[in-house]
Image (cartoon, rainbow, N blue to C red):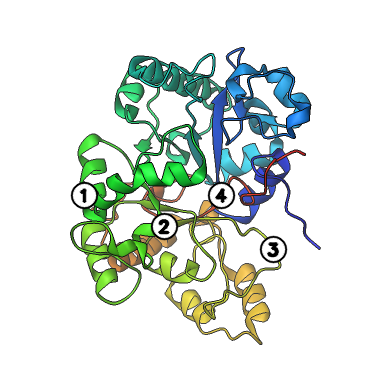
Amino acid sequence: MWQQAPENTLESLRHAIQFHDGIEFDLRLTKDGEVIIHHDEDVSIAKERLTSPKPWVENYTLDELESFGFCSFRSLLEDSVVLEQWRDHGKMGCVELKRPHPKADKGGGFFGRHAHKRHVTELIDAADVLLNEFEVPKENSVYYAFHTGMRPSIEASSTSRPWAELLPYIPPFGNRQTKRLRALPQFVTHSFARLVERHRSSGASMIPCAIEYFVPPMNKLPLGKKVGLSEKGAEHLKMAQGGFPVYVWPTRADIEHKLLAAGLTGLTDHADPNFTWLPSGHARWTRPATLPMDAKQSELLNGATEENHLDVLAELKSDVTPWIECDAARRTELMSMWSKRWSWREVARPAFNPALKDASSPPWQAVRLIGHRGSGKTSRPVFP
């Protein structure tokens, strides 16, 4: 029986990067300027274990955080399984950069916009040093953050890696309910089409997008044309997206099949290898980009029944060629199929996309399934 490891841990991330097309995780800067993998602004351990009256991650050193059980970014990259999958097998790393609580020593206060920009820039540069040291390809990673100054932070940094901004903006303080309430006005005024245009015009490489844009009842709130995963909503989605990569966080098991079929990448909390049949009535394929099926293979998968799907999955896993082993002809076939299905604006040709030749990573627009915080979000505290 598979047991899920705590989120954002080495065990969780190692499993997910093998099981999916990549991983999503969260980075913070420690008190001594190192990079730690951690989601919450408070150190996610039992309160009685805290060694400082200030609970924020940025007020602790790397050694202290590692002693609690948290994983440094360097330790993740030093893991041979993770590094091979990320660097050599074309897996994607979605790196969410976290700002500290405004009251933390490095928080910059509630109105310290310049301090916030400097902090995110420092975090980008620190992460970039490690990614470059371990030779992770630029096309296999993306930085993003809930940070209104994301573009200035990127421009002030030394990175040349892809980036995006998380919208609607959620501040780095407050509980879940208050954060969502603060984000609601921006959600209402930013239609999906406006999100696409904003990211295209700013130079971002993809859109990390909340699932609420695509499922009722919340998808009825944004002004402008409503998008969805079926009927007119799906038509509006395809027109607005125009092939631009969209990563949806976090997807749900009941809509995973529809979401991928619509040309959207999903960040999933479900990494159980025994979860092979979706609630929607479809066999589950967890690596659509790095273990890509052609039209005939996709037809076989979609025709599987609950009774025979394990046999179908076993057959496909033995027959489907991993992206890194595909020759140029096979890659051309796959990219042409994807381009037609999801209306990619660029023509799939070697001059445009090196993925057709010898790149280990599938094309940037490829639809992926990504492990959210590794093998999925877990309960609080992460370490009791």
- Looking at the rendered image, the disc whose residue lies closer to the viewer, 2 or 4, is 2
Q: Circle 2 is placed at which residue position?
A: 211
User: Residue 194 got which mark?
Assistant: 1
| Pick the front one: 73 or 331 | 73
Mark 3 lies on a secondary structure that is: loop
Q: Residue 62's x, y, as percent?
A: 68, 19
Give the amino acid type for the residue marked by disc 4 in the picture.
His
Calculate the distance from the C-alpha at mark 2 to the C-alpha at mark 4.
13 Å
In the rendered image, the vertical position of residue 304 relative to residue 82, given as above or below: below
Q: Circle 3 is placed at which residue position?
A: 273
| Pick the front one: 129 or 278 | 278
**Upstream in the sequence, badge 3 or badge 4?**
3
Mark 4 lies on a secondary structure that is: strand
In the rendered image, the vertical position of residue 51 relative to residue 234, given as above or below: above
Give the amino acid type for the residue marked by disc 2 in the picture.
Ile
Say whether residue 319 is left or right of residue 113: right
Mark 1 lies on a secondary structure that is: helix
Give the amino acid type for the residue marked by disc 3 in the picture.
Pro
Q: How crowded is mark 4: few (under 14 residues within 10 Å), some or many (20 or more)?
A: many
Q: Residues within 10 Å of mark 3 (few under 14, many from 20)?
A: few
Q: Circle 4 is placed at which residue position?
A: 372
Name the residue at 42% across, 65% down: 259
Mark 2 lies on a secondary structure that is: helix
Q: Residue 200's x, y, as percent?
A: 23, 43
Q: Residue 95's x, y, as percent?
A: 50, 36
Calculate the distance from the C-alpha at mark 2 to the C-alpha at mark 3.
23 Å
Name the residue at 40% across, 20% down: 116
